[in-house]
Image (cartoon, helix red, strand yellow):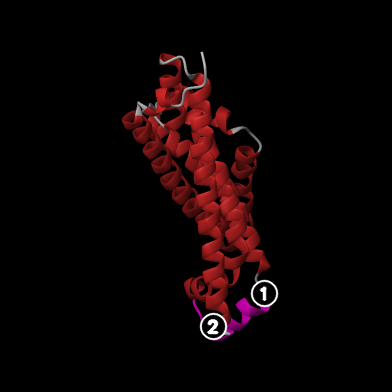
């Protein structure tokens, strides 16, 4: 049997649904991960030694174990502790928690990159903690955290493929099922690779655009 891409493309409605699910899970999971990561990084910076140490342990555990293991523990192990989740919520929660551990370190490094003198000067002027974060820390560290944040978003995009193992109907599961039904598994894998490549390139373009815009904004203010 020869390579026939039309066999896969004939199922375009199912494929579009799978791709849409992948994008949905990726965008929501990445946004949630970045938000949780930022909150964790802020808590570690201002919460004192006890909070910092308490948050370090789960972050290291999450970063030190594979995402697939965490996903299985949440989805299959959750019922043992009374936490029974459907596939999609379990996938979103697992992806968000996994990404949050890495975003927390990205934002923590961003906080540390801001010269202490800038923060001290703002505090001397009577800035509140929220004002210091909003007006001093975030603008100064934003340009530095964009590249690693984009890289983390790309990693989370690729990790969405593992959600097919708990029956989330995303792109990998959908295309694999079509490939198996139509005896066109190679064609299905090629299509999956192409779509992921396009999404990764799109994420890179958006990241570079944001970096360029932010650079111009900072130069204009200077």
Query: Residue at the spot x=54%, y=41% of the render?
Result: 197
SS for callout 2: helix
Q: Earlier in the sequence, mark 2 or mark 1?
A: 1
Q: CA distance from mark 2 to mark 1?
A: 24 Å
Q: Position of residue 192 (x, y in %)?
A: 50, 32
Instruction: Specify the label residue 220 is tagged with.
Output: 2
Question: 192 or 58, which lies in front?
Answer: 192
Disc 2 crowd rating (10 Å Cα; few below 14, some 14-19, many 20+) is: few
> Residue farthest to the left?
13
Magenta residues (range): 116-128
Question: 95 or 26, which lies in front?
Answer: 26
Query: Residue at the spot x=67%, y=74% of the render?
Result: 116
- Which residue is denoted by mark 1 in the rendering? 116
Instruction: Specify the label residue 180 is tagged with.
Output: none
Q: Are marks 2 and 1 in contact (CB under 8 Å)?
A: no
Q: Is residue 201 above or below residue 173?
A: below
Q: Position of residue 10 (x, y in %)?
A: 35, 26
Q: Position of residue 67 (x, y in %)?
A: 57, 33
Q: Main secondary structure of the magenta part?
A: helix
Q: Position of residue 74 (x, y in %)?
A: 48, 29
Quadrant for the C terminus, please: bottom right
Residue 127 in view here: yes
SS for callout 1: helix
The question of residue 121 being in magenta is answered with: yes
User: Which quadrant of the view contains residue 12?
Assistant: top left
Q: Is residue 12 above or below residue 143?
A: above
User: Which quadrant of the view contains residue 221?
Assistant: bottom right
Query: Residue at the spot x=41%, y=26% of the render?
Result: 6
Query: Residue at the spot x=38%, y=31% of the render?
Result: 15
Q: Is residue 203 above or below residue 98?
A: below
Residue 50 in view here: no
């Amino acid at each position: 049997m020869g390579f026939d891409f039309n066999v896969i493309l004939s199922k375009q409605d199912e494929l579009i649904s799978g791709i849409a699910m992948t994008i949905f899970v990726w965008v929501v999971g990445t946004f949630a991960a970045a938000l949780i990561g930022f909150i964790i990084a802020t808590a570690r910076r201002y919460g004192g030694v006890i909070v910092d140490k308490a948050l370090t342990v789960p972050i290291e555990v999450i970063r030190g174990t594979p995402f697939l293991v965490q996903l299985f523990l949440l989805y299959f192990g959750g019922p043992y502790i009374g936490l029974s989740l459907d596939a999609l919520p379990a996938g979103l929660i697992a992806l968000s928690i996994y990404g949050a551990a890495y975003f927390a370190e990205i934002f923590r490094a961003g906080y540390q990159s801001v010269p202490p003198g800038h923060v001290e000067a703002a505090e001397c002027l009577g800035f509140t903690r929220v004002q210091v974060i909003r007006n001093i820390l975030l603008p100064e560290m934003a340009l530095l955290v964009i590249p690693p944040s984009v890289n983390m978003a790309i990693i989370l995009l690729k990790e969405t493929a593992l959600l097919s193992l708990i029956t989330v109907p995303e792109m990998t599961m959908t295309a694999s099922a079509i490939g198996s039904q139509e005896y066109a598994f190679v064609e299905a894998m090629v299509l999956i690779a192409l779509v992921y490549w396009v999404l990764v390139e799109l994420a890179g373009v958006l990241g570079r655009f944001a970096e360029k815009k932010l650079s111009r904004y900072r130069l204009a203010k200077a």
